[in-house]
Amino acid sequence: MKKLILLFALGACVSFIHLVQAQETLPEKIQSYFNTYQAEYPVEKIYLQLDKSTYTLGEDIWFSVFLTAGSSQIPSPLSKPVYVDVFDGNGLLLEGKTIRMEEGRGSGNFTLPAFGNPGEYQIKAYTAWMKNFGKEYFYEASVAVVDGEGGSFLPEVKFKSISEEGGQIAYSVDILAVNKSGAPLSGAQLELKAKSGDTDLHSQNLVLNDQGEASFTFKIPAKAHPSQHLELTYLEGGTYPVIQKISLPYSLSYADIQFLPESGHWILGKKSQMAFRAIYPDGRPVMLEGTLEQNPEISFQSNFAGLGKFEITPDQNVYTALITEKGTGATRQIDLPKVEEQGLVMQVVNNPAASYITAFVQGNVDLGELLLVSQTRGIINYMIQGQLTNGVWGVRIPKENLLSGINQISVLDREGKPLLERLLFYMGEDQLDLEISTTGTLSKRSKIGVDIKSSLAGVPSLTSFAVAVVDGEQVDLDPSASNIFSALLVSSDLKGGLYSPGTYFSDENGVDLEGLDLVMLTHGWSRFSWEEILSGTYPKIESFIERGINIEGQVIDQDDTKKGLAGGSVNAIVGEGIEILSTEFGPNGRFILREMDYLDSATVTITAEDKRLKNFVDVEVIQPEPTFSEIEGAYPDQVLWPESLVATVQERRLQQQMTNPSDDFLDLEAVTVEGQTMQKEEEEQRKIYGTGDVTIRPEDIPSSVGFTNVFQLIQGRVSGVQVFVSGLDVSVQIRGVGSINSGTSPLFLLDNIPVDAQTLLQISPRDVSSVDVFKDPARAAIFGAQGANGVIAVYTKQGMGIAGSVGGTLVTKYGGFSSQKEFYQPMYDEDVTRKGLDDKRATIYWNPIVKTDESGQAKLEYYNTDIAKRQILIIEGMNDEGKLGRAVKVLQ
């Protein structure tokens, strides 16, 4: 009887819940979804301000991190670690940093390898929490990196024609090769390869004429190859390979060209805006022009980003676009979406002079009651029900309701099915007003003063800035690069990337609303789908908000007993008592140590005790898998050679070495001899040939966890050593170690045993203790004739005393937050020791976090270099309400 009563009560409860849900109106259901989303799934976004956009090898990339959270995009109080990865031009992960955030702000730097590969380097930034919403929303940027010590081979490549025939793409090409002095490489021999990533598509040799020129043709299989590029190799001095890589254009037939009617539909007899987006597989825009076959009077052309639009009132069901690529003259036909005979269309008008946005809904069908919803990042700013009257329904959305950024306007039927959608970019009057005034003149090593004043609607604003000052003759401002507005208001809410994002937010001309509207017409909204909203489906949470460094581990039954673990406690000590913390584990043995806060790699002592097995257990730390180990390479259209920047590379490198000594520059008076650990002693005993000129340890390279082969540990980190890996082919050349044999392969050793390069390629970097590189002929003499071309000696962790846990205790190293170098600021009225150095810095001043006082003001001082006659000052910032500001000032 009691069971029957209970079942009846439960049934009544369920019926009541269904009754409440049935009574919930469509607007209430939508509002409830977005309220929950904002409260429980706040979206984080990242922007990185860099000190400049072009670097030479060996320089530091300085960056300041802005992290926002939630629909209002306030400085994030959520994630503490931000991960920043840098990749070389081939997409190889070079280094990863874990940046410690406070109040949504952080900073760091990457030191570019002095002898790495030049090209277009890529940067990604993200938090663990952001992974739940898709990697396509991570912050991305690219910078140009030049080999300032190079310049012996500077090819200029011109593609005269690209055509498709017989299942192949045919290229007709002109090339001119000169050196940094502009002298042609007369009679030089070049090796040319067309490649897709590491895969060769075509290979041939070229001989240049007396003017350093050559004309040639080649073919590759007809396909949209990923990371498609040309690799040109010139042997400097006849032995040392100098490689330049540029992008290989795609045939027009592989371009993604889409025609998209406004709001997703067009119908017979109703005027429509037809937008189009044309991009190649690598994201580059298609420069095209065209007409409609059925109406040649309508013509169109793409803008700098491959976007465009035209107006049309369709009077037939089928239209075809006739397209011509401007550069090559290639042609293509594209069918437009079929014109519908019945349905709805919507036009959205944003008159800058009006105080409202107008949405006109037209149609020739009666669908009854409709619901228009306008929202920005999940905040509903306007929602109204209505229906067509004489085929028209007009809605005015007050601009005072809108937030700056991407606004989505949707029209739903009474069941909540989306009928029409339109994105609109709105820029409100909520940007920070930044006033900059300077004192001083740009004479040699003169003192410059900068006063910054931040206000919002005339009221002083507490603001956190990043400030960069660069030599405008060495590095010009890149107007196409991402900035704080393009990143946080546009790119972070669009899938598929935004080409040349900074162009839409010009420092001189303000916001390009017309260009941004083309972006809105050609990019679909991705953050929310109406199917998920109506079904109450939220993001699947697999990565949690991180408040510090977390270490995951596993406790294992040492003797594999039948009963196994019962669960118990884990205690950990970081370093010499930096942190002491405890946690518990269950019968499955998994544990996690949370929210630790320390810099660099630290020794962590972990002790576990099981309730049943006591300390007869083993402890393992689970190394995190890298988010990215490799991405698609990015290749420039032409080889970059900024003459003013490379002209100062020697002086800048010397100043960097003297003011920030590396391992190669030691202050002998400060050297202290310390006792070696047992582990190091055992390691050195294994090195029967002694240590090399350079020793590389994976633990000193934070990103090595993502490396796939041993040679990545060497690549770009040892002067004079060139490493090329393509599939299973490996080539290593050490410059200057031999004379007759110079240019041939070095000797490879694995735990003192000679092996070939392919054998080393199979060794996991995680199993490597150290790599020794012998370059000096005197050091390599111990190897005899075999070592004439240098030696690469790899030592694994086997037998090195790196044992597992003992008695339930494990001592291991684990990476913490990345420490940051201090940007060198000469104080010429105080720093006497540095006055003798030539000062030709390209980045003159860098301060990643500058905070204004309560009056909204901040004061800065720095010294000019020896040569700067034109300076570019860039300031970007955010206040505690998430309002953004940017200012650029040229001093000369």
Image: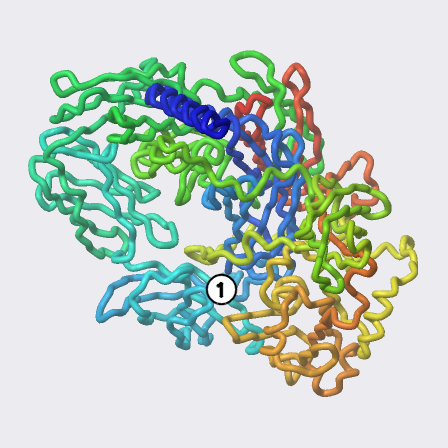
User: Residue beneath label 1, please?
Assistant: 244
Looking at this rendering, what residue extends furthest in the bottom direction? 785
The answer, for residue 324, to whether it is visible in the render is yes
The residue at the point 40 percent across, 21 percent down is 16
Left of 437 or right of it: where is 214?
Answer: left
Left of 269 or right of it: where is 109?
Answer: right
Question: Which picture quadrant has residue 83?
Answer: top right
Q: Element at badge 1?
A: strand
Q: Position of residue 688 (x, y in %)?
A: 82, 79
Q: Position of residue 265 (x, y in %)?
A: 20, 35
The residue at the point 54 percent across, 48 percent down is 123
Q: Position of residue 367 (x, y in %)?
A: 17, 25
Asked if residue 607 is positioned above or below residue 295 in the image, the reply reads below
Left of 872 or right of it: where is 5?
Answer: left
Q: Nearer the viewer, residue 32 or 96?
A: 32
Q: Position of residue 171 (x, y in %)?
A: 30, 66
Looking at this rendering, what residue extends furthest in the front direction? 1
The answer, for residue 404, to whether it is visible in the render is no
